Image (cartoon, helix red, strand yellow):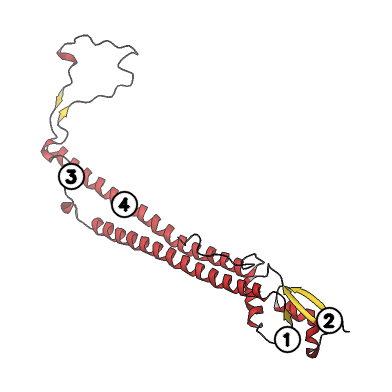
Amino acid sequence: MAQQYTRTVRSMAEVTAAIQELNIQPAEAARLQFEVHEQTSLLDAVKLKARTRAGRQGYKVLNSELLDCKLDANIAIDEVYKSMYRSSTVRIDDALRTVEAAIAQVMVCKQRPDDQIPNVGPPVEHRNRGVEHMIFPHPLYSRNPSFPYGNGNQRPLYQEAYAQPGVDAAVARDKRAQRAIWDEMLRFYEVRKDVLENSKSEMERRMKAVYDSLTEEPTNLGSGYANFDDPPLA
C-alpha cells in the first residue's frame, strides 16, 4: 500500500511545494492530505479558500472549517478598516471645514479699515480717568500690619481723562490690540488646520499599515469563530 502523507501548510506555495517534494501525481492525490495551520495569514487563507471546494479529485483538507473562519475574519477586518477610516475621515473633514470657515472669518476681519473696528472699551472721553495708581517696589505692610487713621495726604489722587492727543493715541492702541488678536487667532487656526491635515494623512498611513499587518502576517484571527461586533465600533 502506498504511503500516506499529511502536511500542515500556511499558503498555496507550501501546498505546491509539498506536492512537488513528495512527487505526488494527480492520480495519487488521495495519498496526500493537508491541514491548514491555525495562524495562517488572512490573505493566504483567502487564496487557499479560493482553491478549495467540495469534491473527490483533489487533496483533502482536514480542517476546512478553519478556512471558513479565516474568510469570515478577513471580511470582518476589511469592513472594520473601511468603517473606521470613513468615520474618522468624516470627523477630521468636519473639523477642517470648521477651521477653514474660522480662518476665512478672521481674514475678513483683518481687512476692515480702522474706522470700522468698533470701540469695546470705555467711552473715549473717559479713558484713563480715575484715581492714580502707583508701583510699590517694596511691600507696603508687615506680616502683622496696623492701620492707624491717616490724614488726607495719604488718599490716592484723582487723575483726569486723556486730553485729545492722549485719546487719539488710546484709540490707535485699541485698533492695534484688536488686530493683534486677529493675527494670533489666525496663527492658532492655521496650526490647527495643519495638524488636522497631517493627522488625516498620518491616520490613513498608519491604519493601512495595521490593515496590511493584520491580513498579511501570521495571526490567530479566524482561528475559530469570534464576534466582531463586541464591542460595537466607535
Please say if 155 is above or below 31.
Answer: above
Please say if 151 is above or below 171.
Answer: above
Callout 3 crowding tier (Cα within 10 Å): few <14, some 14–19, many ≥20: few
The residue pinned by badge 2 equals 22
Identify residue type, mark 3: Val
State yes or no: discs 1 and 2 in contact (Cβ < 8 Å).
no
Identify residue type, mark 4: Asp
Mark earlier in primary sequence (4, 3): 3
Residue at figure coordinates x 61%, y 75% from the top left: 68
What's the CA distance linking mark 4 and mark 1? 74 Å
What's the CA distance linking mark 3 and mark 1? 86 Å
x%, y% of residue 221?
A: 61, 66
How many discs appear? Answer: 4
Mark earlier in primary sequence (1, 2): 2
Residue at figure coordinates x 67%, y 76% from the top left: 64
Mark earlier in primary sequence (4, 2): 2
State yes or no: discs 4 and 2 in contact (Cβ < 8 Å).
no
For marks 4 and 3, give the one nearer the viewer.
3
What's the CA distance linking mark 4 and mark 2? 76 Å
x%, y% of residue 9?
A: 74, 74
Most foreground residue, 122 or 65: 65
State yes or no: discs 3 and 1 in contact (Cβ < 8 Å).
no
Screen quadrant of the C terminus: bottom left
Callout 2 crowding tier (Cα within 10 Å): few <14, some 14–19, many ≥20: few
The residue pinned by badge 1 equals 58
The residue pinned by badge 3 equals 120
Quarter of the image holding residue 42?
A: bottom right
The residue pinned by badge 4 equals 183
Q: Residue furthest front?
A: 1
Residue at figure coordinates x 72%, y 87% from the top left: 56
